[in-house]
Image (cartoon, rainbow, N blue to C red):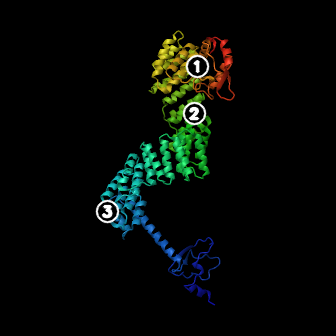
Amino acid sequence: MASPSSLLSWPHRAISLSFQPKNPSPSPATARVSVQDPPPPPSDANPSPGRSSNTSRYVWVNPNSPRAAGLARARAGSGRRARLAAAAAALAACEAGEAPVAAALEAAFPEPPSEQDAVIVLNTTSARPAAVVLALRWFLRNAEVRKEVILYNVALKALRKRRRWSDAEALWEEMLREGVQPDNATFSTVISCARACGMPGKAVEWFEKMPDFGCSPDMLTYSAVIDAYGRAGDAETALRLYDRARAEKWQLDPVICATVIRVHSSSGNFDGALNVFEEMKAAGVKPNLVVYNTVLDAMGRAMRPWVVKTIHRELVSQEAVPNKATYCCLLHAYTRARYGEDAMAVYRVMKDEVMDIDVVLYNMLLSMCADIGYVEEAEEIFRDMKASMDSRSKPDSWSYSSMVTLYSCTGNVAGAEGILNEMVEAGFKPNIFILTSLIRCYGKAGRTDDVVRSFAMLEDLGITPDDRFCGCLLTVAAGTPADELGKVIGCIDRSSAQLGAVVRLLVDAAAPSEPLREAAGELLGGARGVVRMPYCNCLMDLAVNLSQMEKACALLDVALRLGIYSNVQTRTQTQWSLHLRGLSVGAALTTLHVWMSDLYAALQAGDELPPLLGIHTGQGKNTYSDKGLAAVFESHLKELDAPFHEAPDKAGWFLTTSVAARHWLETKKSAELVAV
């Protein structure tokens, strides 16, 4: 029987050291695998039980085994990868001159490189664009190249990555001079390069060259050029190409679907964007995160937050991992739609994930909070902004403006003043938006002297009052007691002489209505559309508060003539209705007064009333009143003993029958119908 020592010396038998155990125990020793040399003799034939063996051990593999061939290939591949990586690094480190580039590549390739070697080096190097082009020329002269167009395509790809459009065009011209025929990949790369460089017109131009070179666009090219047409403002052509791609039975993929969704969204066709999203799922194409983010952005722009919530739930159910872009899309959608709870939930997730939130996103959140009265949430966000270590997240003038607006709308004078002081200490000057909000706050609190002081601040800063600022002063005037009204009218005069003249005609009890009608017609006829209704509302509020109902009716007549209020009265065979939603309290009461007079005149003329009469006030808080218009009207109708009652199944509607309305109107005189 052979001894143990003779077994160790037998070279053709598999010994225990030749194989790795199935479940090796962890060991600090490092194994050296050899396919040539037999294992060296142990340094100690009888090691002590407590001693550790050498830190390095040898594993010998039979050179004739398949495993030996695999190890040899792996070693050769590893060496080649290291050599090509070194060549790419050397190219990146050298100057962008012909001699330095040639020297670096000659040192890396003492023998002619293969085409694949050239592709790998050009594709992985971080060299400057000029060095990439010089390296391309060197490889074309020295490498074993079968298809030159492949190397040109890789170089164009490198230029696209660096957004070097002029270099890409120059390389294309060189390619044609050398007689190299471009292929689909060439066009796809050049088109996407133009798109990446923000030149959609160039991308379209190159797409239209493809037939001249015998190239037909594939799906990648379609995707790039569809986006280019969309960015160039030619959505019609972009979508026509998409239809062509579908007609040619190309398989839809997430890239082109995301592109078409983006084109639809950019052109405002949000239904089309959603249809493409549903169509791709019906065709069996699984949306990726880019597609989800694109359709979320589209639905946010479309002001469809309920669709955004559904798509987000689907994204989570498909186990896609939301990224920062996802959360930004959600924030945009929810803040625009004033979905306060959803927006704050997304914000807190972003905080927990320690995502960067810039001042633009913060300001969107603050603006939403100011509009819907989220005081505590806005204070939390503002504290986070001030505590942020990132300068891109610090409060700016818009942030302070939103906080002042928030406190002003809630009547928190101390809060508004505190934010204003913080703003000045932070080095920002108050702008017209902040002073407008501050004046509104002082007006609500009845602090007329502070209104005048804030107006003086506007003059000191050299800020010219705009239409909205004048409208704010008009709102303050409508709620100012008669004995202090002159102070606010003085501010209005200095802001807009024309508006001041109208207000003076309105408050002068001795002035007739006709001059007011003419002056108001000129003012409102020349005003911007966005301020005409607020001006009308505030002027009628002021007239009603001063018990100038005749002048309020004259103002309403001007507004109806100019089309500022439309569809205030509607009539069908079964119901006559008065629509007051969006009007201020004074404007609504004035409109009710005129409507009741019209109903009384219809009865006097012998006309029949319809079975039902209704007043629609809308529901929720009124912009011009701390209470909703429905609550104001409910109280007012009771004072008039009018037979209108709130409809239980139609929120914001007050209804009555023709019989009850006739009886009530006949017991009243027209002039007594509304006691304001």
User: What is the CA distance from the residue labelled 1 to the residue labelled 2?
Assistant: 31 Å
Horizontal and vertical percent position of residue 465: 47, 25
Q: Earlier in the sequence, mark 1 or mark 2?
A: 2
Residue at the spot of label 3 = 99
Residue at the spot of label 2 = 370
**For the view shown, which residue lies furthest in the left direction?**
177
User: What is the CA distance from the residue labelled 2 to the residue labelled 3?
Assistant: 65 Å
> What amino acid type should be assigned to the residue bearing mark 3?
Ala
> Which residue lies at the image location 62% right of the left edge and 25% below the top edge?
616
User: What is the CA distance from the residue labelled 3 to the residue labelled 1?
Assistant: 87 Å
Q: Earlier in the sequence, mark 2 or mark 3?
A: 3
Q: Residue 559: which numbered mark, if any? A: none
**451 shown above or below 103:** above
Residue at the spot of label 1 = 591
> What amino acid type should be assigned to the residue bearing mark 2?
Ala
Question: Which element type, helix, strand or loop, lies under badge 3?
Answer: helix
